[in-house]
Image (cartoon, helix red, strand yellow):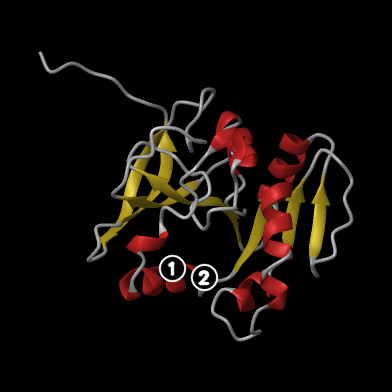
């Protein structure tokens, strides 16, 4: 069985929009694109390198796929991100029927939830989800996320697309691993363990 793992950069107030650059996603008038950049250092790079240095395929929404497909195939083939991204099978969720020029790309359309459930039942590497805000909402609303690998940055943004939007299914997670960079970025990996439990302090 394959796990779906969401890897996301988020602010302290839960925003995941446009972490990598000013023009990445300005929808909704978002003005803070590239908000993660001042916090990157060698420590962060090493942690992310570890996450790339394991067998995985990619599960992407159409917009993120287009951004990645226009960038990673043009980079040095030995680049620590380009190499695994280019090698991975890219499962692309789209409501249209786009041509997928990036090698090893597979279109997922129609009954997306059913097809992703089938994909999870197959043998194979984990399915890493990067970016893909709309797709993540579908995954969270349909209980398809097995693990969350979060990079939590010491900044609040006030507005923007949030990782956990309305419709997220209640669920309990267990912390598997955590690290803190010298610049205050928290790397926290969680796995889903079941339903939310409640109680009382009384």
Q: Is residue 61 visible?
A: no
Height in image: 22 above or below 134? Answer: below
Q: Residue furthest top?
A: 202
Element on which disc 2 rests = helix
Q: So how many labels did they put on this image? A: 2
Callout 2 touching callout 1 (CB < 8 Å):
yes
- What residue is shown with label 2? 52
**Residue 9: image location, x then y, percent:** 44, 51
Instruction: Give the left or right position of residue 156, taking residue 109 as reference.
Output: left
Q: Is residue 202 visible?
A: yes
Q: CA distance from mark 2 to mark 1?
A: 6 Å
Say which of 4 and 13 sits in front: 13
Q: Give the residue drawn at x 63%, y 37%.
A: 134
Height in image: 194 above or below 87? Answer: above
Q: Give the residue drawn at x 31%, y 57%.
A: 177
Instruction: Give the left or right position of residue 76, taking residue 192 as reference.
Output: right
Q: Give the residue drawn at x 51%, y 58%.
A: 20
Which of the 4 image quadrants contains residue 72? bottom right
**Residue 121: image location, x then y, percent:** 68, 49
- What residue is shown with label 1? 48
Please rate how many residues cluster around mark 1, counting C-alpha atoms within 10 Å: few if below 14, some from 14 to 19, many from 20: some
Residue 93 bears which disc, if any? none
């Amino acid at each position: 069985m394959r796990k779906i793992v969401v890897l996301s950069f988020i602010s302290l107030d839960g925003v995941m929009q446009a972490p990598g650059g000013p023009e990445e996603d300005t929808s909704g008038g978002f003005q803070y694109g590239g908000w993660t950049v001042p916090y990157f250092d060698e420590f962060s790079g090493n942690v992310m390198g570890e996450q790339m240095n394991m067998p995985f395929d990619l599960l992407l929404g159409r917009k993120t796929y287009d951004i990645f497909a226009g960038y990673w195939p043009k980079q040095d083939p030995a680049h620590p991100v380009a190499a695994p991204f280019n090698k991975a099978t890219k499962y692309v969720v789209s409501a249209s029927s786009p041509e997928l020029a990036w090698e090893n790309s597979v279109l997922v359309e129609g009954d997306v939830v059913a097809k992703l459930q089938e994909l999870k039942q197959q043998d194979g590497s984990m399915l890493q989800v990067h970016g893909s805000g709309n797709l993540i909402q579908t995954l969270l609303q349909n209980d398809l996320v097995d693990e969350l690998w979060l990079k939590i940055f010491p900044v609040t943004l006030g507005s923007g697309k949030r990782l956990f939007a309305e419709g997220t299914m209640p669920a309990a997670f267990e912390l598997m691993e955590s690290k803190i960079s010298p610049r205050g970025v928290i790397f926290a990996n969680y796995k889903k363990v079941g339903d939310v439990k409640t109680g009382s302090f009384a």
